[in-house]
Amino acid sequence: MMGKRTRGAIRDFQQDAGVDVDGDVGPQTRGALAQRLSEVSVRAQHLAGFFQGGGQSVEDEL
């Protein structure tokens, strides 16, 4: 069961992601969420490399 704020957050995400805005988490929204999570995961790996490498990012080592 979703409340008004959760449904609003879903709609905000849908609008930002460029998918149909309906407040439901259907196939388009799930795909957009998966894509966004993948992007965030890559950024987190780079950030971890920065801290583990004493201030050098993963790109600096390439």
Image (tube, rainbow, N blue to C red):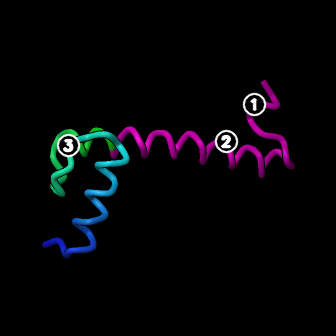
Kindly identify the residue that appears in the image at 77 percent across and 46 percent down.
50
Q: Is residue 20 above or below residue 3?
A: above
* Callout 1 touching callout 2 (CB < 8 Å): yes
Q: Residue at x 86, y 49 (%)?
A: 54
Circle 1 residues within 10 Å: few <14, some 14–19, many ≥20: few
Q: Position of residue 55 (x, y in %)?
A: 85, 48
Task: Please tell me which of labels 1 and 2 falls first in the chain.
Answer: 2
Amino acid type at circle 3 is: Asp
Tag nearer the camera, 3 or 1: 3
In this picture, residue 18 sits left or right of residue 7: right
Which comes before the other along the chain, label 2 or label 3? 3
The answer to which image quadrant residue 35 occupies is top left
What separation in Å lies between label 2 and label 3 (alpha carbons)? 31 Å
Q: Position of residue 41 (x, y in %)?
A: 52, 44
The three-letter amino acid code for the residue at tag 1 is: Glu
Mark 2, residue position: 46
Q: Secondary structure at mark 1?
A: helix
Label 2–label 3 contact, CB within 8 A: no
* Closest to the observer, 46 or 3: 3
Q: Is residue 34 magenta?
A: yes
Q: Residue at x 28, y 38 (%)?
A: 31
Residue in the image at 49% along x and 40% along y:
39
Q: Which residues are magenta?
A: 33-62
Q: Which residue is mark 1?
A: 59
Task: Name the element at disc 2.
Answer: helix
46 falls in the magenta region? yes
Q: CA distance from mark 1 to mark 2?
A: 8 Å
Q: Is residue 21 left or right of residue 46?
A: left
**Mark 3 surroundings: few (<14), some (14-19) or many (≥20) residues within 10 A:** few
- Quarter of the image with the C terminus is top right
